[in-house]
Image (cartoon, rainbow, N blue to C red):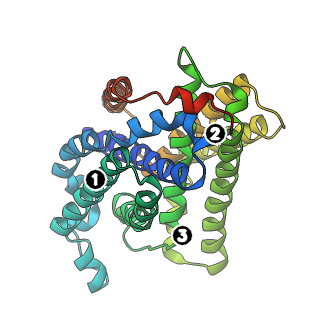
Amino acid sequence: MNVTEALYVAFVGLAGISMGSLVVLMLGHLMNEHWFAPIRAEVEAAALMIPLVLILGIPVAIGIEQLFPWVSERSGLPPARALFLSPGFFLMRSALYLLVCFGMAFWLIRTRHVRRASAVGLGLLTPIMSFAAYDWVLSREPHWWSSLFGFAFGLAQVLAALAGAILVNFLKPDPASPRRMASLERALLTLALLTVWTWFAQFIIVWLANLPQGAEWYLRRSDPWDLRLLTVSSLLILGAIVVLVPSGVSRAAMIGGSALVLLYHGIHTLWILQPMVTFSWLGIGLIVGMICLWIAGFILVMKRRPSYAEEAAAEP
């Protein structure tokens, strides 16, 4: 894995977690403050990491020619898609996605009208995450377009963001009680089941419709190494579902289920982004380094955010 590829993997993963956290934040405000309060500080901090993601994306933008084949070879693309995938327009859209998301995150933590802001934000964020998934992921193989892919990829980011927030909460010195996290556990289980079903539906659509470009996308991810990644990720998400299904809430089950979901997300994202790429220690080191930088920034922001301890301890 070369340097640009490694930076690209880390950028997509970290951008997805930050944007997914913003979705969790909005849904929490819209649905019920009581169940959402225990992880509110975590998702706010993760959403506020978007400026760092934008900075980390600069070297990725510089190496755009190594990541997206349409930059150098535009033959064979429909005229409208070729215009849409012009490098300048692509980079402008990418920056706009992140700037709008950060603006919404900043608005949400400042305004007193969080429900109204969340309703407006979700209306904006849904197309933003869908187009970002197409631009940053699916356009690596630009001859196939899938209207479901953006939703599936965005849903996976929301699942990972929720799992990460729950895990961080339970690893803190003063976590919320497992009973207060019962609704979040059910939400995590529901999202995990929906994510599995959505990715499976995407595969079934390609198979039943006999779409050549879609079939080629899957074939590129079917060599022995990629199949091992897919198998491991499938076992991890099934393991998470098995851990979370039993009724009742326990700290061990939620830590285990959340950790399994995050492992699944990381491996499945590698399967989607990096077919048939040889890993190197340099590439792995760059990915780990960017993740550690994001975590360090997340911890600093967490220290400056309210803990919402009273709301997290209150009865629903």
Q: Residue at x 43, y 49 (%)?
A: 22
Work out which quarter of the rendered image holds the N terminus and state it: top left
| Residue in view at x 57 percent, y 45 percent | 33
Residue 209 numbered tag:
none
Q: Are marks 1 and 3 in contact (CB under 8 Å)?
A: no
Check disc 3 and report the residue beneath it.
148
Q: Nearer the viewer, mark 1 or mark 3?
A: 1
Q: Residue at x 36, y 46 (%)?
A: 15
Residue 278 seen anywhere in this rendered image of the structure: no
State the mark number for residue 232: 2
**Label 1 to label 3, Cα distance in Å?**
27 Å
Question: Seen from this angle, which residue lies furthest right?
Answer: 247
In-front residue for pair 214/135 = 135
What amino acid type should be assigned to the residue bearing mark 3? Leu
Q: In which image quadrant can residue 95 be found?
A: bottom left
Q: Which type of secondary structure does the marked residue at label 2 adopt?
A: helix
Disc 2 versus disc 1: distance between alpha carbons? 37 Å
Callout 2 amino acid: Val
* Circles 2, 1 touching at the beta carbon (< 8 Å): no
Q: Residues within 10 Å of mark 2 (few under 14, many from 20)?
A: some
Q: Earlier in the sequence, mark 2 or mark 1?
A: 1
Q: Is residue 195 left or right of residue 92?
A: right
- Side of 294 relative to 166 (left or right): left
Which of 136 and 280 lies nearest the eye of the viewer? 136
Q: Quadrant of residue 293?
A: top left
> Residue 224's spot in the image, x, y percent?
58, 45
- Residue under pointer 1: 103
Amino acid type, callout 1: Gly
Among all residues in the image, which is located at the extreme top?
173
